[in-house]
Image (cartoon, helix red, strand yellow):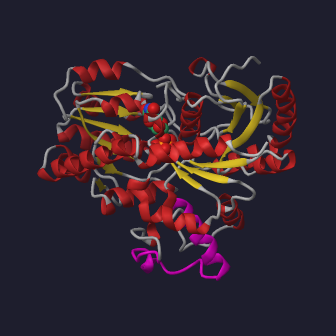
Amino acid sequence: MEQNRTQKHTVVLVPLPLQGHITPMLQLGNILYSKGFSIVVAHSEFRPPNPLNHPEFILHPLSDNLSGYQASSNNLVELILAINSNCRAPLEDYMVQLMEDQKLQGYQVACIIYDSHLCFVDSVATHLKIPGIILRPDMAVYMLAFRYFCQLEAENRISFPGSRLQEPVPGLHPLRFKDLPYPITNEIPEWIMDFFASSVNIRSSVAIILNTTDCLEHSTLSQLQQCYKVPCFPIAPLHKLGAAATSTSFLEEDQSCIAWLEKQPPNSVLYISFGSIACVNEQELTETAWGLGNSGIPFIWVLRSDSIDGSQLEDHFPEAVKALLGERGLIVKWAPQKKVLAHSAVGGFWSHCGWNSTIESICEGVPMICRPHFADQLSNARYLTSEWKVGLEIENVLDRGSIEISIRRLMVDAEGKEMRQIMSVMKDKLEAGLQKGGSSYESLNDLTEFISQLPS
Ligand code: UDP
């Protein structure tokens, strides 16, 4: 490979092939490329990044024995474990070759940046004496929540009655026990506990990069920095720092959304998406459609072909609902979400509260309806609704009445206007953090310096 970069350093990225994880990793790659580093992405064969979207990166597939695998919310841990055991040897073989090639060209591998769930990378990095750096794609508080679980288990206090679920978690304000990543009134299987323990153990990593920012998580970041003795670099929003606005989507983005939005008045449209994994059941789908239809609010609704537990979309819309929705909205399989949220016609976002969606919404000052499904979505929703007060949650069973009321509260009522104003202040703070002297700007410079000075 021919390299002609201002830095003689190459950064190797190892992403986890889930949308919410690979996106921040590739965005970070864009940023480091713009800082003069060469970027190599060693990725699983399962769901590779699209090379057409990343002509500046060297992409290398790692054999993973995962052909035919279907990822769903039920088997994510299984997928992560499989990649951890199948990709270790292919990564090590590739790294040996890459380091030799780099030496011949007068370059060197500065470090490997890897997803926090891919602990096999640490073992390769340690063996080859390459510094490893972890990328956390989520809020800093989520890492602390995992640590809290491990502490509870160590003290044999993991399971307790459901009546305590509303109580605050000590040291993790504003989280309640019900916002933690696993229902702790149940017995937690050993392999889940091992998974939690593994993902908070940074092993020999020399630093942690976090997809968050000081203005969102100031005190949590200080807490986290006290737990880990290596430097923590909070940098967000990553997509606003990268040189190129390339798509990182696995699915094709339906650009018709933008032309449609052009015809809508400012702040009039509700955008609805549950991210790349979360599903709804048939009843929730029908109730949502009725609630949306009855609200009278225009919408763009992302329904992936696998959004409904195991079945096809078409069969599930009764004719009456189709007629109700038909004129006033768009249903698409995958949207150019960042562009949609940035459009002035969008006034609200009904989200599953994945962290990327959350930060993208804050970036554009769009208030939210929160309907978290699992994992960090629960704690993200808690921050949005109770700490930042820019979202309202639909709790309990989804029924058309509460959906209609929530949509109107967000899109029409004074309450929604107030949340939009608070969001707009948050947006300004995030933008300020990206300017010279701002926290993310400076943290990125520190990271760049840190990588350039890592011992070879
Ligand atoms: N996304 C998109 N188009 C869609 C739905 C989602 O581009 O129609 C992107 C969204 O912008 C975000 C990512 O997919 O960057 C989803 O990540 P998130 O962390 O929000 O949720 P996850 O998919 O991991 O549950």
Residue 102 in view (yes/no): yes
Res. 75 in view:
no
Residue 250 placement: quadrant: top right
Name the spot of residue 380 as percent of width and height, x first: 42, 56
Relative placement, left or right, of 450 versus 437 is right
Front one among 282 and 274: 274
Q: Residue at x 70, y 60 (%)?
A: 198
Where is 334 relative to 214, above or below? above
Q: Is residue 119 left or right of residue 97?
A: left
Q: Where in the figure is residue 399, as x and y percent of width and height?
A: 29, 52
Quadrant of the image containing the N terminus: top right
**Relative horizontal placement of residue 227, taking residue 191 as reference (left or right):** left
In the rendered picture of this protein, how many numbered marks are placed on residues? Answer: 0
- Residue nearest the viewer, comparing 310 with 14: 14
Q: Is residue 2 magenta?
A: no
Snapshot quadrant of residue 149:
bottom right
Task: Answer whether residue 161 is magenta in the image.
Answer: yes
Q: Quadrant of the C terminus?
A: top right
Residue 9: give x, y in percent of width and height: 71, 33
Q: Residue at x 66, y 23 (%)?
A: 5
The residues colored magenta run: 142-170
Figure check: 239 above or below 73: above
Residue 330 location in percent, x, y? 31, 26
